[in-house]
Amino acid sequence: MRPRSGLRSCCILVFAIAVAACGKGGKTQGGPAGPGGQGDRPIPVTAERVHLRPWNDTVQALGNVKARESITVTAKVSEIVQSVHFDSGDHVAAGASLVTLSGKAQQAALVQAEATAKEADQLLKRQTELAAQQLIARSALDTQRATRDATRARVEQMKADIGDREVRAPFAGVLGIRQVSPGSLITPGTPIATLDDTERVYIDFPVPETLLARVGKGQSVSGTSAAYPGRRFEGEVSTVDARIDPATRAVTVRGDFPNPDRLLRPGMLVQMTLLQPERQALLVPEISVVQVGTDSYVFRLKPDNTVERSDVKVGTRREGLAEIVEGLKVGEQIVIDGTGKLRVGSKVQVSAAASPAVPAQTREAESEAPAPAVVPGSAAAPGKDGRNG
């Protein structure tokens, strides 16, 4: 009987110790200070008051660079190249001679046409004198005048034919790679070189149909290229296409960009950012927003230096800032840094945070973002609880 009594006593003692241990553990974890067994000791955090700041909504897309004027230089006639007056990559002025084609036969024909025209003009002068003396009929004079005019027209025709053998630049620009050499035979359509006017360039990019009402001529637009890291090109919207592509449900927007150093070249791919008109928005540092699944919330400070959870609706985000569309009011104080240690009801020791600067230009896209709701403190009146509908 004694061994059984001793075993029963040991079991009762072990059970009592386990119950006591569980009670202590529950007390430690259930305290308002959160995990770590800190008891009632305040948790150091960084906090700041939220307020309205200037904000630009953005639309972002990929665009293609196009020259203001762009052609492939070709000849109008089939002929042998006599001489080439440019090198690949040259900058040429409008009207500059690029290629001269052989035209000996046309030069000879021009001399003949000029001689015929000169003879017809002299004969017309003699017949005019005879007609004044009524020695010839007026009809003969009219016939000779028509002959003289035809010979002059032939001269002009031959001059134009010779002019076609001098290929000139129709506008100022930059030539591409030369594709002909002296002595080669070219025909109409044979490429001689490309010519692009890139002092100013266009960048075409698509904008979703749903954002059409937010795009207009004169809006600021900027672009970046992988070819020039850290370089940002500034321009403005010059044209919004009159048609929407039925396949992509997008409208093509054209931006006009100055390009004095000619860094942007036709065919380049550019990341475009279209800035919307500036408005006031309730902005907080993005690190202060806690994301759990589809729920977003911040920790709001109470007068007794404890925190409470405030569910928020986040609008657009960029450069470390998040727009709060719903859930906060101007002047409320929220925790910025240290949210990972907090639970509802935790006591905190607050230190102020420096407000981050609002970016002057947009960096992130929000093409698919919904239209922003009215921000508390804006022209629209908030509800009784300080939140927007």
Image (spheres, grey):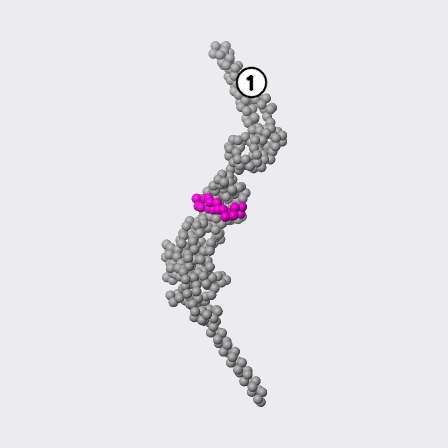
The percent position of residue 147, horizontal first and vertical second, equals: 53, 18
SS state under label 1:
helix
Q: Which residues are magenta?
A: 218-236
Q: Residue at x 43, y 44 (%)?
A: 218
* Residue ranking furthest to the right: 184
165 is higher (above) or lower (below) than 39? above
Residue 178 makes an appearance in the image: yes
Q: Quadrant of residue 71?
A: top right
* Residue ranking furthest to the bottom: 1
Label 1: how many residues lie within 10 Å, few (<14), some (14-19) or many (20+)?
some
Q: Is residue 235 magenta?
A: yes
Q: Quadrant of the N terminus?
A: bottom right
286 is higher (above) or lower (below) than 268? below
The residue singled out by tag 1 in the image is 115
Q: Quadrant of the C terminus?
A: bottom left
120 is higher (above) or lower (below) than 331? above
Q: Quadrant of residue 186?
A: top right
Q: Residue at x 39, y 59 (%)?
A: 49
